[in-house]
Image (spheres, grey):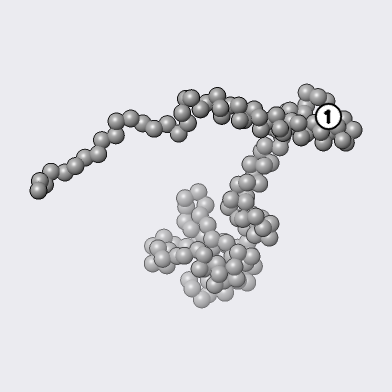
Amino acid sequence: MSTKKKHRVYYHHHEIIDDNDTYGLIALLLAIWGLYWLTVHWVDYLLGDWLVWWVEPLTIFVVLPVVVGVVMVVEEYGWNPLYWWPMFWGTKIYLDRDTDFYMEFDEQEFMQNNGGRINVHCGNWRDEDMYIKFRRKRDAVIYSLKNL
């Protein structure tokens, strides 16, 4: 048996999108845009032709930021709008990085023990300290008195 170390060598780089797939991707995006345009055109036709013909395909630039915003909110907080309260109000309690509790923190277990997602939210803000956000100030005070 030799004790020589084996090294892995990568000979080429794998692209996420192959150059041959570019035209297919552009065709797919144009097809989605065309279906969107057709849908807007028929809705506009049924409502009495309020939009000018050249405005119909440009409405996607108005709708797209709204859709992206909703997708981001759903990704962070979930589909239920009752769970979106941390965007607007709540009492934050920052956890100190030096404590042992910070390293062993399990978000799902903590939320279930403190009233679920309707009452408590755990998160990080821009790679800073971890925080716990309570919907009611009363719950935040009780938690702080018991645990901190």
Above or below, 28 against 134 in this view is above
Please say if 137 is above or below 23.
below
Image x and y of residue 127, in percent: 47, 50
Closer to the camera, 84 or 127? 84
Query: Within the image, what quadrant is residue 48 found in?
Result: top right
Q: Which residue sits at x=42%, y=31%?
A: 15
Residue 29 percent coordinates (x, y): 62, 30
Residue positioned 41% across, 60% down in the render: 97
Residue sitting farthest toward the bottom: 146
Q: Is residue 118 visible?
A: yes
Outermost residue, right side: 48
Query: As rendered, which of 97 and 108 lies closer to the eye?
Result: 108
Residue 110 picture location, percent across and down: 51, 68
Identify the residue at image location x=10%, y=46%: 2
> Residue 68's spot in the image, x, y percent?
63, 41
Compare residues 134 and 62 and report the one nearer the observer.
62
Amino acid at circle 1: Leu
Task: Identify whether 15 is placed above or below 132.
Answer: above
Secondary structure type for disc 1? loop
Left or right, 12 with respect to 55, comes to: left
Closer to the camera in the image, 66 or 14: 14
Residue that numbered label 1 is attached to: 51
Q: Residue at x 53, y 75 (%)?
A: 145
Mark yes or no: residue 134 visible.
no
Q: Neighbour class for label 1 at 10 Å: few (<14), some, many (≥20)?
A: some
